[in-house]
Amino acid sequence: MKTSLADVAAQAAPIVQLAGDASPGQALATEEAMLAKARAFAEPLLTGQRFGTGEDALHHADGVAAILKNIGAAPSMRAAAYLVYAAEYLNKPEEVVAKAYGESYASLVAHTRKLVQIQRSARDALADEAAERDTQMSAEQLERVRKMLLAFSRDLRVVLMRLASRLQTLRYYAVSKHPCPGVLARESLQVFAPLANRLGIWQIKWEIEDLAFRFLQPDDYKAIARLLDETRVEREKNIEQARAKLEAELRRVGIQAEVQGRPKHLYSIWKKMQGKSLSIERVFDVRALRVIVNSVADCYAALGRVHELWRSLPDEFDDYIARPKANGYQSLHTVVLGSSGRPVEIQIRTREMHEHAESGVAAHWAYKEAGARGYSGVVAAGDFEEQVAQARKAVLRQLLAWERDLATADDGKHQGRAAGEGLFDDRIYVFTPQGAIIDLPAGATPVDFAYTLHTDLGHRCRGAKVDGAMVPLNTPLQSGQTVEVTALKEGGPSLDWLNPELGYLQSTRSKAKVRAWFNALAQQQTIARGREAVEKLLQREGRTAIKLEDLANQLGFRNADALFEVVGKDEYSLKNIEHLLKPAEPAPDPDEALAQKLSRGESSSSTPKGGVLVVGVESLLTTLARCCKPAPPDAIGGYVTRGKGVAIHRADCSNFRQMAGRQPERVIAVEWGAAAGTRDKPAVYPVDVAVEAADRQGLLRDISEVFAKEKMNVIGVNTQTLKGTAWMTFTVEVTDSARLASVLGVARQVSGVRSARRK
């Protein structure tokens, strides 16, 4: 049952009285006194309560405080742990804690409770997904949860408390013998242990790994334990004996050194055996020491003393000082047989090398979690890893020092911002109503959220609820919020969304999707205008029966919409369509005409139709070849066809030369007539012009204007665009091909045109 503010007023009153109104933390005599008061405050609220895991609430809070003490946390932070759990049983927890302990602790309580809610939602969603696919959580989703944990917890005290809480829960399952849920154990192994590892909290990291390993793979855990044939206590005792012996020997010979014991835990041993296919006898760093000295010379001197104390294994020596690893890691590695006859790995390095290995690109957790480069099979987290590697050393040292120096709640609040802000400000993590985690840029709005889920949902978005409350669509979201979008069945975005001053969109991708929608809408309107213009023309010409797709193909367009678009943009003249629709004049039977003219064998200098004089034959049917489209004053030749009269080719036409080579008897001499056409309307000839240009909007219109200004009628256009280059073929009518050269020179001056030539 929840406790109201009035119910706890009497309990909080002594604390409030001591704290004072102006600065709640200043009046507390000592941090130890504050810790005792916090536990006294929480005890009646937690007694008899149980968490969803089955844990006794007060026992859990005591365990978390003890774990925090073991990692060096100040009493003020352990006091905060009690307040966090007590807040679960208050009606207005932030208000109560703020009044009794100050805003710093109220903020900590609020953040931690929210983070617990987020973790639970994410774990449930991941469990459902894993159950549906019968697989474990994906590495991508796990890494998103990891990043969310740090990004949301700007106050890193929250992270430390969540780590301690998870370790205490695992200890509960181990002691109580109750089965640990698989999803909780996997989350502990794949999220919390790497988080502790990256933060350098080794004792929490290895214990979480061992306990999760024990719950997830009990058979493997027991097998490794049996293979070690000694208990952890015995191993740690042996390591401590070796550490003390080496430290004393180095001190005796005048080498200042810090010797650290580093016993290997069961999960790490199993990973190495699996990753490298090793037997337990070949895992030499089951027991390990690290020696930190002042200089490189001391490194080699210490190595000599190590080899004098114990017998070394020659094949297990690596000099990474003389030959550093590619990532800059430096250290001496050797394996010796200790007093018990078991192998002990010893690492020797300077303080600078140690700092680099612990906090630089060669940090122990980095190369152990570097995928193919390590042996754990865990993929490194890219840009997230780089951020943590850069920030971890400074943040953690500030964190515990800040907790110890937390003399007042106000100071704690200020230093909390200094330690936490700015590390992960560029991303936020919110939830769908189903619990899926959505990664968004900082400052993102519900509209950005909708577009991230689905483009169509973004277009139709008209309202949003954040944590169950309706909010404006330009409301900036915060990490940990649950967002629900209200959408129309049909609709599109608003132009206001693209106004940066209104703040509807922050995501670049969302803005691009909105612009694409409006561009598509504008294109549809242009096509509609073009269709209307073409259909009106067909009505005037009485040709409404013609198929629009066929008309577009005859004009050289890939489909009708392509024709309508250029017409709607005023880039293509309707006169081209009118010319195509004009009925062709009937022509005489070519076979009959050819027979009559050849039978008479008459010679005349008159010019037959088409402006071509066929020498020795009067008014003979002639056609201009389509392959080369001759026009005066081109050098020409004639070829007597079967059924189509005499075809007139340019003398340099490859088709003409091939036909003349096969049947030279069908070639006749021809020349242009001097009286082609009339003074008012000279004869015109179609010729093809090929243009290559860089594609751009308005290109077709600009080139067409050149031909229009030169009074050359364009009767056909064919365009093709590939990788930004447009190839265009214009069919124009000319009276004199010699004049075409000057027109092509003008066309080459059009912006983007690379070449313009007659085909």
Image: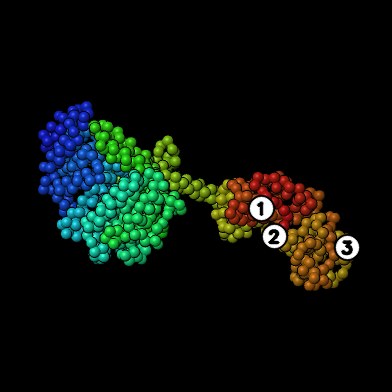
Whether residue 484 appears in this view of the structure is no
| Foreground of the two, 665 or 105 | 105
- Crowd rating for badge 2 (residues with CA inside 10 Å; few <14, some 14–19, many 20+): few
* Nearer-the-camera pick, 443 or 674: 443
Q: Which quadrant of the figure contains the C terminus?
A: bottom right
Q: Position of residue 96 (x, y in %)?
A: 18, 36
Residue 302 percent across, percent down from the top left: 36, 50
For the residue pair 139 and 518, the one nearer the viewer reads as 139
Which residue, as the protein is rendered here, is positioned at the far front? 253
Is residue 283 shown left or right of residue 4? right
The residue type indicated by label 1 comes to: Glu
> Would you identify the image quadrant in which residue 12 lies?
top left
Q: Residue at x 66, y 52 (%)?
A: 692
**In the image, 244: left or right of 44?**
right
Which badge, 3 or 1, is on the more N-terminal residue? 3
Which quadrant does the N terminus fall into? top left
Q: Which mark is residue 707?
A: none
Residue on which disc 3 sits: 604
Q: Nearer the viewer, residue 597 or 367?
A: 367
Toward the top, the furthest residue is: 22
Report the amino acid beneath label 2: Ala
Residue 77 in view in this figure: yes
Q: CA distance from mark 1 to mark 2?
A: 32 Å
Q: Which residue is mark 2?
A: 584
Quarter location, residue 136: bottom left
Of labels 1 and 2, earlier in sequence is 2
Q: Is residue 587 above or below residue 260?
A: below
Q: Marks 2/3: CA distance?
A: 28 Å
User: Which residue does the numbered mark 1 point to in the structure image?
Assistant: 692
Q: Residue at x 84, y 67 (%)?
A: 668
Residue 643's image quarter? bottom right
Q: Residue at x 56, y 56 (%)?
A: 560
